[in-house]
Image (cartoon, rainbow, N blue to C red):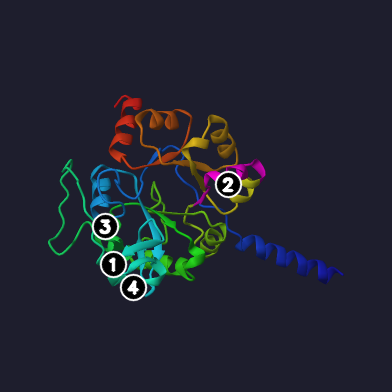
Amino acid sequence: MKKGILLFLLILLSACSTASVAATLPDDKFLIIAHRGASAYAPEHSLLSYGLAVQMKADYIELDVHMTKDGELVSMHDPFVHLPNGRKTVAEVDFQELKSVRRESDYDGKLTVSFPESIDPLRIVSTEEIFSYFQDDVNYYIELKTPASYPGIEEALLGQLREFGLLPLGEAEMPKVILQSFNANSLLKIHEQEPTIPLIQLYSLKNETMLTKKRLQKVAAYASGIGVDKTVVTEELVELVHGEGLHIHPFTVNEEKEIRRMIEIGADGIFTDVPDVAIKVLKDLRGE
């Protein structure tokens, strides 16, 4: 009997020692996350859009990640693309086909962003190209889009982050990488492999009823925060989320009045198409 009890205690201690808690985010920093880059001014998820966001001094550039037929990770929002031979899903096409998609821009030159002649700053780009261009000079807020459609996407992304020296995360003031998804299973898989990465559980409007104390307690076991539509964010929700040790990042907040409100009710950051506007509002509120 004593041996059985001892064995049980050893197993329990072993489980406790290997269990990992959710990574932390800075509590004293309001994060301005460039939604698909500075996408109000340039084609979303393009190098131009990201370059503008960096020039505007956004805290993070946001990447939406899909996987092509030939296993390339690409940054684009929609799971499909319009080609000369019709609409196809990203999973049905090779990266070379995506690179041929032409995108126009009416960018007015608000800020000067220059690229080498060999780079087309408007075309669809891979995550590898983005990491190669910006290296660790910027912070990345990455969403895995419909990861269940792309078996192995988590491992592929983590592999690239390691390759470019973005993992493991150190003791920097702000984490170099934050990962987000609507898919809890995908986040749990990442948490098991790289528990130092802050994770954000996303919620759509149709799932806002899941924002309960009980549910948030479960989320806090693996995630650092939640991302929700701005229309459901109230002071009461912010308090509820903070009460469970989570951060809250509303999307997509573009109007000055909305940005100011999110700051005033205690949100921890926002996704915005206009990072320059958000930075101006934040500075005005701080009297800078």
Marks 3 and 2: CB-CB under 8 Å? no
Q: Secondary structure at mark 2?
A: helix
Q: Which residue is mark 3?
A: 134
Q: Which mark is residue 207?
A: 2
Q: Mark 2 or mark 3, which is nearer the start of the sequence?
A: 3
Q: How many marks?
A: 4
Q: CA distance from mark 3 to mark 2?
A: 35 Å
N-terminal-most mark, 1 or 3: 1
* Label annotation for residue 94: 4
Q: In which image quadrant can residue 285 be found?
A: top left
Q: In the rendered structure, which amino acid carries the disc numbered 2?
A: Asn
Disc 1 on helix, strand or loop?
A: loop
Q: Residues within 10 Å of mark 2 (few under 14, many from 20)?
A: few
Q: Give how far apart the Cα atoms at labels 1 and 2 are.
A: 36 Å
* Position in image of residue 122 (x %, y %): 22, 56
Residue at numbered disc 1:
84
Per the model, the C-alpha gap separating discs 1 and 4 is 14 Å
Where does the image place residue 39, in percent across and percent down from the top left?
Answer: 30, 46
With 236 as the anchor, is 42 left or right in this view? left
Magenta stretch: includes residue 173: no
Q: Tell me which amino acid carries mark 3.
A: Phe
User: Where does residue 181 sit, x and y in percent of width and height?
Assistant: 49, 55
Residue 246 falls left or right of residue 69: right
Q: Amino acid at mark 4?
A: Asp
Decide: is 225 above or below 284: below
Secondary structure under tag 3 reads: helix
Say which of marks 1 and 2 sits in front.
1
Left or right: 3, with 237 as reference point = right
Residue lying furthest front:
85
Residue at horizontal 46 percent and vertical 39 percent from the top: 27
Q: Residue at x 49, y 66 (%)?
A: 149
View extreme (left): residue:
117
